[in-house]
Amino acid sequence: MADNSSSPTNATAVAAFFDLDKTIIASSSALAFSKPFLRQGLINRRAALKSAYAQLMFSLAGADADKTERLRAEISRLCSGWDVDQVRSIVTETLHDVVAPLVYAEAAHLIAEHKAEGHDVVVLSATGDEVVTPIAEMLGVTRSVATRMEVVDGRYSGQIEFYCYGEQKAVAAKRLAAEYGYDLASCHAYTDSSTDAPLLEVVGHPHAVNPDRALRRLAVERGWPVHSFDNPVSLRSRLPAPSATVMAVGLSVGAVAAGATLFGLSRRRRKD
């Protein structure tokens, strides 16, 4: 868990929990790095094409629980053996070029509004911790919780230590509330996916952002606000250059594995 705050907040603190993909950024955060991975030889052209197709499906229909779990398992298997330092180097070199242009202006505005009101802003994402952490710091949010992949001897084992997905996002929110004194009845949550319904149900102010069909139905039934974000803009002029902390954190392949939308990755460079 990445934490950019200096100390726990008081017993009546408020947090705004944000999903990342299609809520803050207009893409899969894992898939966003497919081009840099291709250039560095971590994936081949066929895998890159598959990832582009997966991104199209992700954008059009979202990823339901069954698809997400199948892709997670496949990616976890295929990514086993990747060198942590190599992947870390790729993301630190490309983070601002790859991610900053994808941030929804509407999400950036909401984040700024919550911060102005004194709320903590927390990113909860199924994408790997090593990609979520630098994005969270780039956005200036308070803290983040994401998926963690096991590392053995400097390489990814293919095993996931914590999968920040579905019910586990609600568990993470409750844990953070206990630790930092958040009043969940006063907290907000923003997400695009029906798989995050458990998170939306534990806060007093749930919001559906670019919702999939199931979440849209649920939002209408429950009377939850529905937001349409459609204006990704480059934040390069408004965001600071990567800090020393971001450069140190980098990206592990857990970011790709737990993103749960990129598939067809190979363990090492293969010829097409």
Image: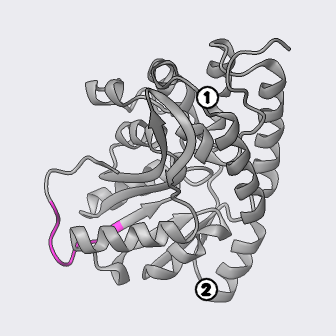
Of residue 157 and residue 222, the one placed in the foreground of this image is 157
Question: For the residue labelled by badge 1, is the local secondary structure a helix, a strand or a loop?
Answer: helix
Residue 13 sits inside the magenta stretch: yes
Horizontal side of 18 relative to 116 (left or right) equals: right
Horizontal side of 104 relative to 244 (left or right) equals: right
Instruction: Name the front one of labels 2 and 1.
Output: 1
The residue identified by callout 2 is 223
Mark 1: amino acid: Phe
Question: For the residue labelled by badge 2, is the local secondary structure a helix, a strand or a loop?
Answer: loop
Instruction: Say whether disc 2 or disc 1 marks the residue closer to the N-terminus.
Output: 1
User: What's the residue at 34%, 61% (across, down)?
Assistant: 114
Is 53 rendered above or below residue 167? above
User: What's the residue at 80%, 57% (across, down)?
Assistant: 61
Magenta: main secondary structure equals: loop
Horizontal side of 179 relative to 199 (left or right) equals: left
Distance (Cα) linking label 2 and label 1:
36 Å
Q: Residues within 10 Å of mark 2 (few under 14, many from 20)?
A: few
Is 75 rendered above or below residue 100? below
User: What's the residue at 69%, 50% (across, down)?
Assistant: 73
Magenta part of the chain: 8-15
The residue identified by callout 1 is 33
User: What's the residue at 77%, 34% (across, down)?
Assistant: 51
